[in-house]
Amino acid sequence: MAAPVVFFALFFAWPVVSIVERGLRVDGAWQFGRFGETLSRPEILDVLWFTCWQALASTGLTLLIALPGAYVFARFDFRGKGLLRAVVTVPFVMPTVMVGTAFLALVGRGGLLDGLWGVRLDGTVWAILIAHVFFNYAVVVRTVGGLWAQLDPRQEEAARVLGASRWRAWRTVTLPALAPSVAAAALMVFLFTASSFAVVQILGGSTYSTLETEIYRQTVVRFDLTTAAVLTMVQFFAVGLVLAVHARIVRRRETALRLVAPEETARRPRGAGQWALFAVVLVSVALLIVLPLGVLVERSFATSHGYGLDYYRALQTPDPSGTFLVPLLDTIGNSLRYAVVATLIALVIGGLAAAALTRRAGRLVRGFDALLMLPLGVSAVTVGFGFLITLDEPPFDLRASWILVPLAQALVGVPFVVRTMLPVLRAVDDRLREAAAVLGASPWRAWREVDLPLVRRALLIAAGFAFAVSLGEFGATVFIARPDSPTLTVAVARLLGRPGELNYGQAMALSTILMVVCAVSLLLLERLRTERTSGEF
């Protein structure tokens, strides 16, 4: 527990508390009366209501569409499976700015669907909901599918032999085993959609606003730190309540599971029903994920005089405006270096936290389980400004150091590591560890010989998630990235904020490069995962 506690105390609690103190403490006196004043304003109540219901709707729609995909990836074996798994994960690495831009290019004025069928969804809540599904599809597929692929199908088959129907066997055997993983995925999707910023800002326009966009507006545009602090505290307590409810539900459903190698459960689809499900999932992936990504790629090559590589060549030249101190192509190397370091930090901190939580050592540990998820629900604007305010004096003067960016990215990666590894670690039968201890194994050797082989797949999945979110993190990075070493996401956002065809084309080109880098990285990780997990069980 020590390392995770210290990490979150220094790089999350301290910055957030400092921002809140600046907003609510004036001349040494706390202004708690501003809570009632702020929360009674009609426009703030509208923001709170929209934030809650669109997050619930986005979560439900994502589970409805993505759970069949999780089943297909977990139970079916088909050609190109690794490539398709990487493709569905690419949207999750994209900056939310680009997610909004992709759907605007697809369903907005002059977009692909506007030209074909006259469909206009920009400025409606449907565009926001569909974009959220696009962004979070991989969360459900990888979190739920990772555990589903390791569930022993013979348990469900035994229920069928005893007379249960296929639906009853799935409902009474498989679903309870998957419940903690489904709950973890739903929690992450809810937190991401509740704190949605760029997607709502681009697709919702001035009609819709979430708590995150309002905090940004009050902090950056109006510089009203008091209102921003009140909204941050509301967000903090709301997320804490959701996490407490989630933890209570999951604890009631935890069971020891029989886990097997994924290679033992995956097979080719059989029967008309399975082939129909497989086709439906492929069509949904093509329309929901591949089509928006294809629009981005097409726009990166479409110049005023036809298709070409002009925007890509422009990335190699210095920025004439002086906004970027290095060629934009250098942002690729910066992003990869930051992401690798952030992934290592997230794996160490998240792995230690998951191992500690597995022991169920009282309310303190269970409370820390909820605290680990707070970075997903607390405004990245607050965290970014908090970094600038707190980490500027010895012994933690890090504002000029490159490590500040990976630390901020790791804050978002740790919850994914914990949520991915925890269901598998808790599913390991304690009797296996006890048997190893009886045979003379030390606690370290028992973990290495019993737990590690079973959780190695989950560990690699967690590494993929941490790497993906580090590549695509934008909210905090935009405030702390140094001008001489910007990341891909920061460069894309700044290019989109500047007028001109060249800037827009370069943003599309950088986004396409980011997609390719993510896909290649995930394919390599998928190959490594397959090689290491084969034969271990």
Image: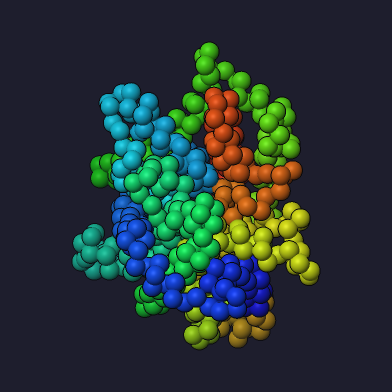
Can the viewer see residue 432? no
Q: Is residue 158 left or right of residue 400?
A: left
Q: x%, y% of residue 171?
A: 27, 65
Residue 262 place in picture, x, y as percent: 48, 56
Q: Residue at x 40, y 55 (%)?
A: 210
Residue nearest the viewer, comparing 333 with 491:
491
Please give left or right for residue 154 compared with residue 409 in the image: left
Pick out the residue farthest to the right: 394
Residue located 76% across and 56% down the image: 401
Which quadrant would the C terminus be assigned to in this image?
A: bottom right
**Residue, x 61% and y 20% (percent of image)?**
310
Q: Can you tell which quarter of the image residue 177 is in?
A: bottom left
Q: Residue at x 38, y 43 (%)?
A: 205
Above or below, 160 against 426 in this view is above
- Residue 242, image x and y in percent? 39, 70
**In the image: residue 504, left or right of residue 328:** left
The answer to which of 339 and 391 lies nearer the viewer is 391
Q: Check the image and report above or below for 308 versus 221.
A: above
Q: What is the x, y in percent for residue 253?
A: 36, 75
